[in-house]
Image: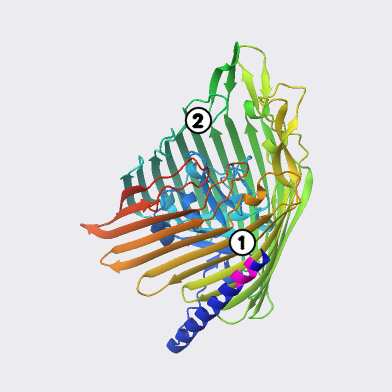
Amino acid sequence: MKTDLITSMALLWGATGLFVADVRVALAADGDRDSDFPQVLTPSRLPQRLDDAPSTVTIIDRAMIEASGARRLVDVLRLVPGLQVGYKNNSLPTATYHGLSDEYARRMLLLLNGQRIFQYSRGVIEWNNLPIPLENIERIEVVRGPAAAAYGSNALQAVINIQTGSPAEYPGLSAQIAGGSDGIADGFLRYGGRVGVMDYTLSLSSVGDSGYPGVYDDRRNTSLSFMGDVPFEAGGELKLQAGFARGDYGIENPESTSSEPARDFPVTDNFQSLQWRKPGTRKDEWTLTLSHNAFHYGDRGFRNDQLLPGVTLQFDYDIEEERYEADVQYIRRFSDRWRTRAGFGYYQERVRSPFYFDTDATLSNEVSWLAGHGEYRIDPAWVLNAGAMLEYSSLTASWLFLPRFSVHYHVDDWQTLRLAYSTGSRQPTLYENDGRAVIRAVNVPLTIYRVIASGGLNPEINRSLEVGYHWQAERNQFDVRLFQEHYSDYIGTYYRPAPDVPTALPGVVLDFANDDPIIVRGLEAQWDWRNLSGTRLFASYALTTIDASGTRYDAGYEDSAPRHGLGLLASQEFGNGWQASLNYDYQSGMQWYRDRPIDGYHQLGVRLAKRFKLGSTPVTAELVGANLLGPVSDYLPNREWDRSVFLRFSLDR
């Protein structure tokens, strides 16, 4: 591993040095340098230059989303170095950073415009069913590494911040329609206008396909979303957001030991958010955010009267969850060299599922937190970042202290070196701590247990150390990081004897326990290059290894991330409205947590687009092909995505 890292680092550093030297000579000859560095908000919740941020960030903008040809948000994330995407079922895609996850990935935090809207008490993200259409997403900031100092629980491995445009950016009518192989049939409609002083946007989206070939795996996701901005005469604004999404899925599990039939079920998500922002009088600003979201997984399962003579068993997967949150932030700029952010918040999670908790009662967990961050410029070359969070969960009845620190040295106007230490955390979910999953008989008094959680779990902690290098000139940038992450109290699963109750597996039930240590090491690089002739190239590479030799359970931790990952997105403008792009993804073999290994795969997508006008209406026509190198297995070895082609038409008025 050390040899791999040293060799890779040396090659990257050498190539970077030659490339930077050539570009700097060209810039010096022209006498031109773009000093407008990209700004990021997600790492510290302060607006910062990308090369000053305390965490490494991948920025995916609207042009990259379009060039990728993706129909789902989760597939756009394949561009991020070190991040894996997989589909055990078409109904529930999953994404994880540096492995250590099953189909219910719960160690990354997903935000919408900086708000924790889609994270439920299970920690699971419903990627298919987010009430925000892909067409409204203008930018995605992915913090690669733990960020609990700013966000607390679930910011264990990474933070993904979806950023939409403002309602004023979407005036008039926009529409899109797509259709193609594998049952692809998508539609999108958006209208923006003004009522009084409020700008608003209303969007309706429907996305569907037939899923894996040869499997009953159809899906149809329909969403309605609203955004509104109300400015104040004295400065500041009120932002309103709301969304509703319904997913209708077919599911089939031919490997089930309980003769599980193919069936249909719905999933619904909804959220409401209000954010008030008010500038002060001393270069300061207050922000208050209130939000609510709810989730209902409506799979009522099936009945079986063949497993036990004379007994009809009910298998049920229905679960309802709800979350209320309040968040207050205060930002103060003391001078050009020193500024700070402070905040506090509270959220309550509720969950009800008689078959996952063996009770009709609603369970809850409450989390309170207090956090702060400071940025200090010692001089033009040196920048310090320091922040921390105090977090209390009623489930663990304990306080966590979650610090972060980084130091940046600007070698010159183009190059920056950084050293960063950060922590991540994840509180145990209610299911991990209190779960009692059961199968109930409907004609006799019988309860069979599948899961009995012993409780008393500690939060997962990730302590990360990284050394990085960032280069930027004009609109081109390169970033490389060498990192080590140390996980303690990782929450895993194991089977334990349960002789006193009827069990689904002979004499044992599934339980949850803390496990450690797990060490993740690696190297990641990304390069975003553009020129004046309309060419853009985004390339990424990740080398990842996991050392779990000291853990108590042999759970396949070490194989849960691919050793090598490579991504490439290339696009070219040809004039007269023509554009073409190529999206390539390579991942070496891996094994999702407690599932069967999959081989490495190569994935290739191509997009050809033409922009033109029908009268005065701008129209875009696209031809998109995916998996053009052949079938791809990204989660299970016996489930493959086949080649697909679809047409898409968009218009704006």
Circle 1: residue type: Pro
Look at 76% across and 34% down and name the residue there. Answer: 454
Is 20 or 431 nearer to us in this picture? 20
Residue topped by disc 1: 43
Residue topped by disc 2: 254
Look at 23% across and 58% down and name the residue there. Answer: 613
- Judged left or right of residue 499, residue 165 is left
Is 16 or 172 nearer to us in this picture? 16
Instruction: Name the quarter where the C terminus is drawn.
Output: bottom left
Position in image of residue 552 (x %, y %):
76, 45
Instruction: Name the quarter where the N terminus is drawn.
Output: bottom right
User: Would you place residue 512 above or below residue 340 in this image?
Assistant: above
The local crowd at label 2, few if under 14, some if 14 to 19, many if 20 or more residues have their Cα within 10 Å, is few
Extent of the magenta region: 4-9
Is 504 or 236 nearer to us in this picture? 504
Mark 1: which secondary structure? loop
Q: Is residue 341 visible?
A: no
Residue extending furthest toward the left: 615
Q: Is residue 546 visible?
A: yes
Look at 57% across and 62% down and name the residue there. Answer: 542
